[in-house]
Image (cartoon, rainbow, N blue to C red):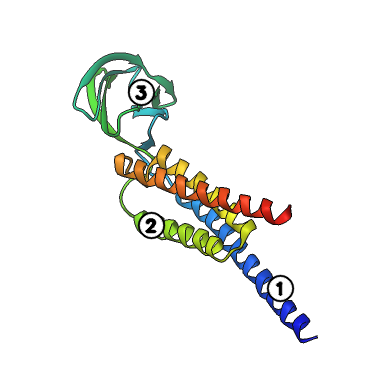
């Protein structure tokens, strides 16, 4: 009877840990969606299209005549902007390079040929500034802690789940960087995260198979 009571207590504790771990994993998923979906006006995600914009109520036309890239090289172009009311737009998709861009528009403002320079920024994630760095670092720490706690705590199902989540998170880092940063360092960290998550998920899966056979 005493053994049964101890067994029931252990089972309840195990179930409670499972529920708490699942709760933290779900919370992580929600936080990832929140942190990595925030955007800023005037900043575009790398390799995404941006609508080049100008406002001129007295213009009959506006053209994009030049684009300057982050490396400093300027390309002369002749793009006709589409007029919608008093707004002029042109969809620009050559955003492979990271950094500050500028484009020149020329139009007949009040009957006089007038040119303006307008800037925008391209970052890996489409966000700017360092405001989210602390939040992202905390999120990364939580992901590592939850995964290691599940693994070393011999919680096989959650080790598989958290290891897979960690692997997908590493892939996301390699593809998108961390906030406004994407370089060799963030790529290396992403690959390490992928490797750790994959090893834990695979190891836990093997143990689960061995226990069930």
Residue 211 occupies quadrant? bottom right
- Pointer 2 local density, CA inside 10 Å: few below 14, some 14–19, many at least 20: few
* Of marks 3 and 2, the one in the foreground: 2
Is 151 drawn above or below residue 37 in the view shown?
A: below
Q: Secondary structure at mark 2?
A: helix
Is 116 drawn above or below residue 132 in the view shown?
A: above
Can you identify the residue that label 2 sits on?
Answer: 137
Q: Please, which residue is most extreme toward the bottom here?
A: 2
72 vs 62, left or right, is left
182 vs 76, left or right, is right
Q: Could you tell me residue 209's position as x and y percent?
A: 68, 51
Residue 94, numbered label: 3
Residue 75, numbered label: none
Cα gap from disc 1 to disc 3, whole angstroms: 57 Å
Q: Nearer the viewer, residue 111 or 123?
A: 123
Q: Could you tell me residue 212's position as x and y percent?
A: 73, 54
- Pointer 3 local density, CA inside 10 Å: few below 14, some 14–19, many at least 20: few
Can you identify the residue that label 1 sits on?
Answer: 11
Is 25 drawn above or below residue 74 in the view shown?
A: below
């Amino acid at each position: 009877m005493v053994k049964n009571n101890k067994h029931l207590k252990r089972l309840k504790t195990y179930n409670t840990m499972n529920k708490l771990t699942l709760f933290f994993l779900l919370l992580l998923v929600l936080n990832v969606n929140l942190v990595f979906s925030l955007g800023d006006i005037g900043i575009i995600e790398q390799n995404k299209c941006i609508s080049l914009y100008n406002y001129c109520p007295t213009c009959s036309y506006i053209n994009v005549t030049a684009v300057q890239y982050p490396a400093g090289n300027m390309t002369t172009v002749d793009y006709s902007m589409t007029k919608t009311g008093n707004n002029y737009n042109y969809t620009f998709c050559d955003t492979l390079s990271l950094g500050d861009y500028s484009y020149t528009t020329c139009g007949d403002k009040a009957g006089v040929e007038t040119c303006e320079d307008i800037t925008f920024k391209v970052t890996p994630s489409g966000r700017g500034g360092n405001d989210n760095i602390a939040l992202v670092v905390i999120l990364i720490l939580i992901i590592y802690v939850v995964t290691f706690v599940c693994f070393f705590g011999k919680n096989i199902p959650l080790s598989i789940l958290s290891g897979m989540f960690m692997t997908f998170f590493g892939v996301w880092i390699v593809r998108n960087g961390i906030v406004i940063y994407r370089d060799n360092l963030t790529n290396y960290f992403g690959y390490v995260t992928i490797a750790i998550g994959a090893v834990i998920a695979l190891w836990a899966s093997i143990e689960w198979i061995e226990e069930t056979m």
